[in-house]
């Protein structure tokens, strides 16, 4: 009798093998990753292979002057940005050769980052889910919704920065 034919795998909802994609970071992205903490580079690189949406790196390390300019134009809310220390990156999603800011694409990328972060055991936060690192959620969408709901309860507008990812303050204080 062949027990192996029993359908145990569906009973235990075994995880499907991770689908991978053969996107590669271009020269510009690689240059932007210079000075970024190696753990975050590792997660971003693995995430690219887990993402059905191709993406590039538009920002890594940022100077104080650049941060001041962003703050002045309200594109950032802090001078304590993790970009200043190489603990953060911004990505841009590609649709063919063009960049798209469609948030749906950034949820896909964040989900790939979540999987890569868990696999590499590196805590990574997302700019559209500021409560906890992505590692603590079952999906990037869940993380996003938890944050938005929390802000609603507090009667505050959520600050959504879909392209932004950073190492957790707890595990990477400096
Ligand atoms: Zn950023």
Image (cartoon, rainbow, N blue to C red):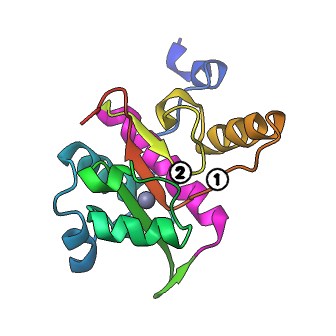
Ligand 1 appears in which quadrant?
A: bottom left
Location of residue 43 in the rendering, given as x and y in whole percent from the top left corner: 31, 47
Stretch of the chain drawn in magenta: 101-120
Q: Report how far apart the C-alphas of labels 2 and 1 lie in the structure.
A: 8 Å
Point 36% across, 26% down: residue? 170
Q: Main secondary structure of the magenta part?
A: helix
Is there any visible trace of residue 107 in the rendered image?
yes
**Camera-nearest residue between 127 and 72:** 72
The image's mark for residue 159 is 1
Q: Is mark 1 within 8 Å of ligand 1?
A: no
Point 21% across, 69% down: residue? 30
The image's mark for residue 127 is 2
Q: Quadrant of residue 56?
A: bottom left
Point 47% across, 50% down: residue? 112
**Camera-nearest residue between 153 and 78:** 78
Q: Tag 2: Cα neighbours inside 10 Å, few (<14), some, or many (≥20)? A: some
- Vertical comparison of 117 with 58: above or below: above
Location of residue 45 in the rendering, given as x and y in whole percent from the top left corner: 29, 56
Location of residue 103 in the rendering, given as x and y in whole percent from the top left corner: 65, 64
Q: Is residue 102 magenta?
A: yes
Instruction: Kindly check if marks 2 and 1 are in contact, taking CB atoms under 8 A apart as contact.
Output: yes
Q: Say what secondary structure mark 1 lies in.
A: loop
Q: Is mark 2 within 8 Å of ligand 1?
A: yes
Marker count (numbered): 2
The image's mark for residue 47 is none
């Amino acid at each position: 009798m062949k027990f192996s034919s029993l359908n145990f795998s569906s009973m235990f909802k075994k995880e499907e093998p991770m689908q991978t994609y053969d996107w590669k970071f271009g020269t510009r992205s690689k240059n932007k990753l210079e000075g970024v903490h190696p753990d975050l580079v590792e997660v971003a690189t693995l995430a690219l292979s887990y993402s059905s949406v191709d993406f590039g790196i538009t920002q890594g390390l940022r100077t104080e002057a650049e941060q001041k300019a962003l703050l002045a134009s309200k594109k950032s809310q802090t001078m304590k940005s993790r970009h200043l220390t190489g603990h953060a990156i911004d990505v841009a999603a590609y649709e063919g050769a063009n960049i798209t800011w469609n948030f749906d694409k950034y949820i896909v990328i964040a989900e790939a980052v979540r999987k890569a972060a868990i696999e590499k055991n590196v805590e990574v936060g997302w700019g559209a889910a500021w409560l906890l690192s992505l590692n603590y959620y079952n999906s990037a969408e869940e993380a996003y919704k938890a944050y938005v709901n929390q802000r609603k309860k507090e009667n505050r507008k959520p600050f959504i920065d879909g392209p932004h990812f950073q190492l957790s303050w707890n595990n990477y204080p400096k």
